[in-house]
Image (tube, grey):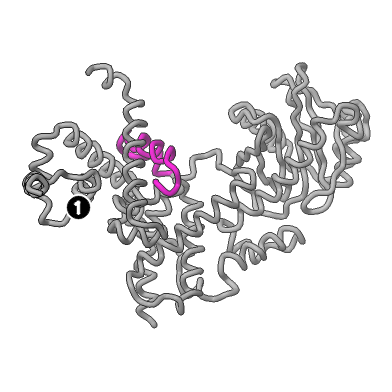
Amino acid sequence: MGSFRQGVSASVPALRRYARALTRDAELADDLVQDTLVRALRSEHLFHGGDLRSWLYTILTNLNRNRLRALARRPTMAAIEDNDAADQAGPEAGSRDIERALATLADDQRSVLLLVVLEGLSYREVAEVQGVPIGTVMSRLARARMQIKDYLDGKRPALRRVK
Amino acid sequence: MNDKKLDEIMMERDLPVTADELHAYVDGLLPSDRSDAVEAWLATHPKDTAYVAEWRVQAEAIRARYGAVANEPVPARFDLDDLAQPRRNWRAIAAATILAAVTGSAAGWIAHGVSAASQSRFEQFSAEALAAHNLYVTEVRHPIEVGAGEDHLLPWLSRRVGATLRAPNLEAYSLKLLGGRLLPGPNGAAALFMYETPGGERYTFYASRANTPRTALRYNAAGDAAAVLWVESDMGYVVSGPAERERLIKIAQSAYREIESRLPTRSTENRTTSRRGS
């Protein structure tokens, strides 16, 4: 079963990337990844082959849902200092915009868009991760893209007025 | 019958491209036998072409923003051999740290799990402070036990909390100290100081032993009220007030600076009797 652990280990960078974009908080994201790894290692016997990365994304997505549910019942906590240093160091001015645009999405929509665009999963794999039919994935993806467009258009009123 | 057949033939010839196919085209997930059809469609549908271009820009922006995270060196906390040991997983560490913080024997466990558990510890601390805040700011007749004008306010609370306390001067924010009260806190006694603006807005300053490492200031909103908390020299401090982030942070920073500048003081008696001298 050494290959299982190797596979999990190799997925850590991608899980961190997904979690960072999903939560937009480096500390929170790494907590989520760590929890995902612990859960995965403990549930090794439940993994019956298939794509290991998709399985890990599924665990992470579910843990994040639980976290949000718990959070809705508790006061929210945010660091005064920006928790993700890359935010300020980002070379492009636009990196802030896409971050804010992502923040406006519903969590399931953001998750679909990130799994497709950032993690390169197929629509079918995303459907499995989220436990929904593929049609739901497509409509979430479409809504996510429209909403980001609306947000970014709103941020560029000058460009809009030109036409 | 004939009409139906004709329809089918027409459909096949310029089979309309669906929105799903446009997404698949952008995401590189389109079956290869449809790519010609999609490209032909886009050549004659400028609106869809604009969408496709926009979605590509979005995808590029997301990858530009977050792609590099996967190239960061993986921190040691993700060592799978460590994580596989049940006693050192996140929950065990978090639970042990909370317990340790409460009982005041934290050192060993905290060294292992500070970042994973800090959120929970913070939440507990600020939840207590916010609960006290919410309970007493609405109190019209008895918001405090001992008034600001009474000499024994600080000696009494300092003795009970077990540390030299001072109520920060927040006059710069039009906040007048009304007085204080003693409360049960996360690690024994806690002191709650109440401030009021001329307009009747109330803020509280909460102090209790923390037995945790020093931390940065954190902002924590819960409905109408919010708190800023930090730990310094084994003492946890929470400034609570109406949830106006900028103002509350300024007030907390002011309180933080004042306390910082007075540290360290040793015994309660020193401060209270020094009045005579100064």
Q: Position of residue A60 (x, y in %)?
A: 45, 60
Towards the viewer: B13 or A27: B13
Left or right: B39 with respect to B98?
Answer: left
**Compared with residue B11, is residue A157 higher up or lower down, i.e. above or below?**
above
Residue shown at 34%/31% (left/top)?
A150
Q: Which residues are magenta?
A: A85-109
Where on the picture, by quarter, is residue B110? bottom right
Looking at the rendered structure, the number of numbered marks drawn on it comes to 1
Residue shown at 34%/54% (left/top)?
A115
Residue shown at 78%/20% (left/top)?
B200
Q: Position of residue A112 (x, y in %)?
A: 36, 51
Q: Is residue A89 magenta?
A: yes
Residue sitting at the far front = B1
Q: Position of residue A49 (x, y in %)?
A: 35, 76
Towards the viewer: B156 or A123: A123
Left or right: A93 with respect to B202?
Answer: left
**Compared with residue B30, is residue B94 higher up or lower down, i.e. above or below?**
below
- Which amino acid type is shown beneath numbered disc 1? Gly
Residue shown at 67%/32% (left/top)?
B224
> Neighbour class for label 1 at 10 Å: few (<14), some, many (≥20)?
some
Element type where label 1 sits in the image: loop
Chain name for mark 1: B
**Compared with residue B277, is residue B206 higher up or lower down, i.e. above or below?**
below
Q: Position of residue B3 (x, y in %)?
A: 9, 44
Left or right: B204 with respect to B178?
Answer: left
Quadrant where the image shows the N terminus of chain A: bottom left
Quadrant where the image shows the C terminus of chain A: top left
Residue that badge 1 annotates = B28
Towards the viewer: B239 or B37: B37
Q: Is residue A30 magenta?
A: no
The overriding secondary structure of the stretch rendered in magenta is helix
